[in-house]
Image (spheres, rainbow, N blue to C red):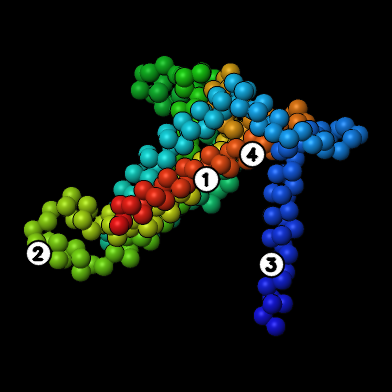
Amino acid sequence: MGLLFVVPAALYVVIFQLGPVLYGLVLSFSSYSPISRSGPEFIGWDNYAAIFNDPQFGQAMLVTGRYVLQVLPVTVVIALGLAMLSNRAFRGVGLFRTGLYVPHVVSLTAVSMVWLWMYSDQGLVNQVLDFFGQSGQRWLTTEGGALNAVSVMRIWKALGSNMVLLLAGLQTVPKDLYEAARVDGANAWQQFRAVTLPGIRPMLTYVVVMDIIYLAQGFAEIFVLTQGGPYGTTTTVNYLIYTEAFQYNEMGSASAMAFVLFAFIAGLTIVALRAGQGRRS
């Protein structure tokens, strides 16, 4: 009887999740364009060899890695600080937590549209600079600044969810440990290092891993804010997959890129998990 309750969910996973993944794996070893009359043609490892010799793909990998490294540490550190502040009892703490979490419930595309206006020549950011007597900047159209501008938006977007998760981790740390540390003469920094960090390490590892997965798949913010420009300086691997599949109709090459990106994310995830486990042990 219990099996009947599991079957619908299992069928959903097999048909709509595992099925497309396996089909994409097959396509990655094929040459296929949906506008051609012929079906996929098996070509072995040619797609993988081509993308590893493609400088555009190499640049996209570097942009993706830089994007993760720029956003992840800043997001986690600020979110941890906000979580520790939210863990204190003060008037309006509920409103404070809600305000920080609001960006998370708004879709990434909608948030990107708002920031697109903020970064425009007459947008809010340049208006603030003008108020303080500074000249405005072209935030999204310079090679050196476009990815930084996107990163700032992504940090703001990710703070709320990270803060809530870390706050949940903080509230699992027994208060007795802090009292024992104070009795032993530990100052605030020593309590943070000896009690807080070990107590929230599992949740901290989870936050880092999930951020790596989401950031390495960055697409919506890139599509809305920069369209991968200028000159490919914000073209992440996921955006390159989109252009390869839906602008050039190269489904085989796009599928191969997707599996290389999967391996990249899996590698970063394993490193993060091992770092968390190693320090915990």
Q: Tell me the number on the disc at residue 183.
A: 2
Q: Which residue is mark 3?
A: 9
Rendered image: mark on residue 266: 1
Q: Amino acid at mark 4?
A: Ala
User: What numbered label is drawn on residue 258?
Assistant: 4
The quadrant holding residue 197 is: bottom left
Q: Amino acid at mark 2?
A: Val
Q: How many other residues sit within 10 Å of disc 2, few (<14), some (14-19) or many (≥20)?
A: few
In the picture provided, is 212 more to the left or to the right than 182? Answer: right
- Residue 145 visible in the displayed image: yes
- Secondary structure beneath dot 1 equals helix
User: Can residue 242 be seen by looking at this rendering?
Assistant: no
The answer to whether the residues at label 1 and label 2 have Cβ atoms under 8 Å apart is no
How many numbered badges does the structure rendering display? 4
Q: In the image, what residue type sits under mark 1?
A: Ala
Image position, residue 154 (x, y; %): 48, 38
